Image (cartoon, rainbow, N blue to C red):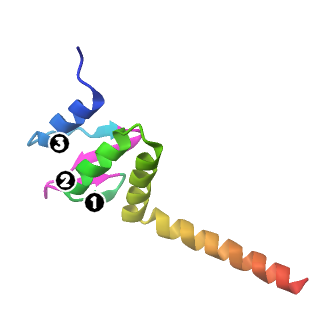
Amino acid sequence: MPPTKEEDFESWIRSKYNPRPFYIARHRFEKSQTGSIIIDKAVFDLEEAVDVGRMLLSVNPVSRLSAQVAIWEKNGTLVKGVLVIAIVLLILVILFLRR
């Protein structure tokens, strides 16, 4: 029986040196030379990366969404998204008040 994606991820995490990135649900996991894991250009501790990987491999959509938000938060995408939404809402309020 072939190994599951979770077993492959666990063995990739445990290996001391594996220069090839590991992909989970279109997210790229890379090992850095400092021992941390880089997920989509965001630096995570080893434990955090394991948790995010398990959440992405989960069948629970809420867990997968939580992992996605954690990645967005670490690489700055979440802040940029909230800022864009705030600007759009501000413009809408200004337009509404002018009428």
Q: Using the rendered view, name the quadrant where residue 81 is placed.
A: bottom right
Q: Amino acid at mark 2?
A: Ser
At 37% from the left and 43% from the top, the residue drawn is 56
At 27% from the left and 53% from the top, the residue drawn is 38
Pointer 3 residue: 13
Pointer 1 residue: 43
Q: Amino acid at mark 1?
A: Val
Q: Position of residue 65 (x, y in %)?
A: 46, 50
Query: Does the magenta run of residues contain 30?
Result: yes
Q: Are marks 2 and 1 in contact (CB under 8 Å)?
A: yes
Q: Position of residue 13 (x, y in %)?
A: 17, 42
Q: Position of residue 1 (x, y in %)?
A: 23, 14
Q: Earlier in the sequence, mark 1 or mark 3?
A: 3
How far, Cα to Cα, is label 2 from label 1?
9 Å
* Residue bounds of the magenta highlight: 24-39
In depth, the one of 38 and 71 nearer the eye is: 71
Mark carried by residue 32 = 2
